[in-house]
Amino acid sequence: MQRSQYCFIIPFREDFLVYNTLNGSLTVIDSEMYDVLMTGKGSPEIIEALSKQGLLIEDTGQEMNLIQASLEQKKWCLPSTGYRGSPLGRVAFLNFIVTHECNLNCRYCYRNSSACTGHMSKKVAERGVTFAENQIVRGIDTLFVSLYGGEPLLNQECITSLTETLQEACSEAGISLLIKLFTNGTLLTPEGLDNLSQFTVADIHITFDAPEYYHHTRRVFPDETSSLQSVVEGAQCVEDHGMNLIMRINVWEDNIITFLEMLREAGLEKAHTYFGTVTPRMDYCTHYYSSYGYPGTSDLFSEVMEMAAHKGFTTLPFGIGVYFSLCAGITDWFHIINVDGRVYKCMSLVGDTRHAVGSLNSRGSLDKTPAYYSWMARNPLAITECKACVMLPRCMGGCPAIALREKGTLDAPGCFTVDFTRQVFGLPQVKTYVSKQKEAHE
């Protein structure tokens, strides 16, 4: 018998926590079982116990085959998934950047260093709808459409046309349309939300900076005035309409209690909250996500999440956790349509035409570029460092954009600097085990 290549082992007191990143098994073993795990030799009872957990196996080559088969399935097969606890069936994801214009002048915005400008035209929107119809005939159950900017509400005409036409196409095909709106919140009105509410809206996503001083000085209007009051009013409007609100809070310091109390006093009680950073790892501001790739931020986010939970906020998970998997960008069911009709696989690369995977033609088909084949051919098992990494089944090679940024190629690791040991210790069953161990030693 051989030890699985994907045993993540954490010493704890006299025992060892073993998390198998391939099959998800989590167990505690003593020193005797540890010796058997490392050598593959020992009593039949222990070998059988470790084998049942997938920690001892007969052939490690089988694991590689399993990962390769899983990779191919995830790349080419429509995912069956759910959202907010509701099943969606087979889903295709389309992201429309309807404008690069914005009514704010945030200090860290991608627009300050990007050539991206303009609204999505009627012609491009029509091609996007036809592309969506081509996705529908693949046999999906749900079309999940996200609307991005700039500030998307500056191109309300395009949003109205897109949502109405997509709803008509989905209704005719007998499938569901789910819409997500990413907005700075300042242009949300009761009238606009009344119009949007005729569709099934998954979430409306709004961003704050905290503590309050940073929002006042960084998320500002062109005349340098703070957008905070307008954003709060927009968020209130969403909750008043009974729509799902997600609040992303960019964290600059850990003393955000006053900011959270302000949101609570403003009546923002139902929103899901998560925390991010605007350290520019990527080129696109909306993808400066959480602790993805940043040393030291994992602890910071953990602290502020506890603060938010204490204040009664529902928080979304951060970091890669133990569930992070294949980047959607290297699948055949995730596309980002830019204002000019070019299609991308990663929001952080939008506007860099070298990485456009194609353009939409008049038939709503994708005229593919060499970049398309580079993305779809990415295989972490062909990357030496990834193939030998215990984290491979969880991260599947990590973030392609980080690989491009740091190595200049998609065929390189896109590693996150997240403390995975901390992630494992954050699992409920591990917390329970650790608590019992502490009680036993007190």
Image (cartoon, rainbow, N blue to C red):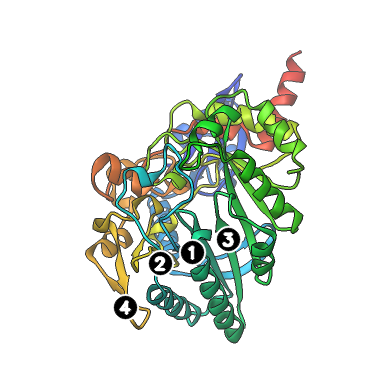
First in sequence: mark 3 vs mark 4: 3
Percent of width and height locating residue 89: 61, 70
Cβ atoms at labels 3 and 4 below 8 Å apart: no
Label of residue 71 in the image: none
Distance from Cα at disc 2 to Cα at disc 4: 15 Å
* Residue indicated by mark 4: 361
Q: Residue furthest bottom?
A: 172
Q: Amino acid at mark 3?
A: Lys
Within-10-Å neighbours for mark 1: few <14, some 14–19, many 20+: many
Label of residue 120 in the image: 2
Q: Amino acid at mark 1?
A: Asn
Percent of width and height locating residue 217: 51, 31
The reply, left or right, for residue 280 in relation to residue 54 is left
The reply, left or right, for residue 219 in relation to residue 359 is right
Mark 1 or 4: in front is 1
Cβ atoms at labels 1 and 2 below 8 Å apart: yes
* Residue indicated by mark 1: 155
First in sequence: mark 1 vs mark 4: 1
Percent of width and height locating residue 74: 45, 62
Q: Secondary structure at mark 3?
A: strand
Q: Amino acid at mark 4?
A: Asn
Label of residue 180 in the image: 3
Q: Is residue 68 above or below residue 13?
A: below
Q: Is residue 109 above or below residue 327?
A: above
Q: Secondary structure at mark 2?
A: loop
Distance from Cα at disc 1 to Cα at disc 4: 22 Å
| Residue visible at 61% across and 82% down in the picture | 171
Q: Secondary structure at mark 4?
A: loop
